[in-house]
Image (tube, grey):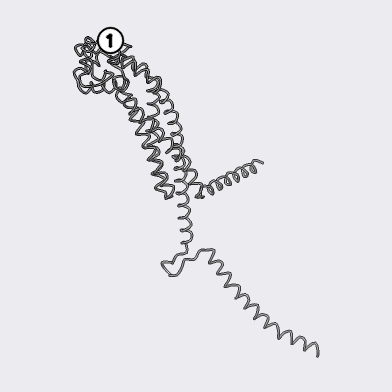
Amino acid sequence: MKETKKLSTASNSTQSSSRFSTLLDREGFHMTSLLVPLTLIIVLSTVLLVVAAIFVGSFRLQLLTMASGNFLASPVLMIMSSCFSIILAIFGFVVVLKKQLNLYTALGCLGLVVFLLHLVAVIFSFLLRDNVDSDFNKVNVDDQLSKAAHNNATMAVWDALQIRYKCCGGRGNSGFNEWESHLNGTYPDSCCTVKYPGCGRQAHRTLESDFTQTVYERIHVKGCVTAIKQSLEEYVMPLLLAWGLIGLMVLLAELAVILLCVVFTWHLKRRETRGTRLQLENSSGDSCPVHGGRKISGSSRHEDKQETLQPQAGRKISSASRQSRPSRSRRTSEARD
């Protein structure tokens, strides 16, 4: 009973392996199995690239390095991983059309590199989302404003943030007051609601000459740390969550491409080894280096001997029959006498 069970399991395993090999031999299986994950990668990666571009172009996350360096690293990784994923998908479409062993190997290696890069980008996106509050609470506003007052590059960063988020100064709803101690009672032009050269310096003069105008109409009063934090919590954090979830789907598709490339490479190599074995078996009857002609195996020699023995046996039988014929005639003649 145990032997029969072993034989049945072995036969089932051979049948399943043969079915799998026949499935891999089909060209349509190669195309459909790769086209599905590649299509998902190129579509979802395009969405991820657009969202990452919004982070950089609209919300200016790369300028928030005063809070954490992750605000610069995460958008860069997002854009790089999305671009490389699109390149991976395009190269995968080329591999599907070419159907070559070396290209499958190259696609698998490229897919592994892109998979690791995309994994790091997804991790950074979740870290950025979880650490927004703690990063902005650690910002030393007074130190940053003093640097901006003496450094044009830092002032350019603050100008870009104040124009984008319509804010001025540091924290709170009266953050504009924090500029006065660093700019001799004036404000940057980026704080003005109506911008023109020197509007920040003339803000107090216009208020003194026109008492009906208030500071809230001349400059933005809300602090930038407060305004940026509110905007990130309202818009950026949900987008970061969506980017991370879509990134996980792209990771699964990339993993599927890598596994398929490994399987196809293994199958093609196995088929090539089978082809070389058949060629060696067919070429076993090559010419003999000593006697010339073709080499003859032991089984063919045995068959040739049997063929040569059969006509010889026929000849012996025919000669024996000829010798037996006159003896029979003599016997009949003696019987008559």
- Residue at 34%, 25% (x, y): give it: 59
Q: Is residue 66 above or below residue 295?
A: above
In percent of width and height, residue 328 lies at: 74, 84
Q: Residue at x 33, y 29 (%)?
A: 57
* Quarter of the image with the C terminus in it: bottom right
Residue 189, x across and y down, in percent: 23, 19
The foreground one among 88 and 109 is 88
Instruction: Report the side of 147 relative to 134 (left or right).
Output: left
Using the rendered view, name the quadrant where residue 81 is placed. top left
For label 1, the crowd category at 10 Å Cα-Cα, with few meaning under 14, some 14 to 19 and many 20 or more, is few
- Looking at the rendered structure, the secondary structure element under dot 1 is loop
Amino acid under disc 1: Thr
In this rendering, the answer to whether 209 lies above or below 198 is: above
Going by the image, does 319 lie left or right of 271? right
Residue under label 1: 212
The N terminus lies in which quarter of the figure?
top right
Which residue occupies the foreground of this view, 236 or 219? 219
Q: Quadrant of residue 212?
A: top left
266 vs 63: above or below? below
Percent of width and height locating residue 198: 20, 19
Residue with the most extreme right position: 336
| Residue 314 image position (x, y, % from top left) | 63, 76
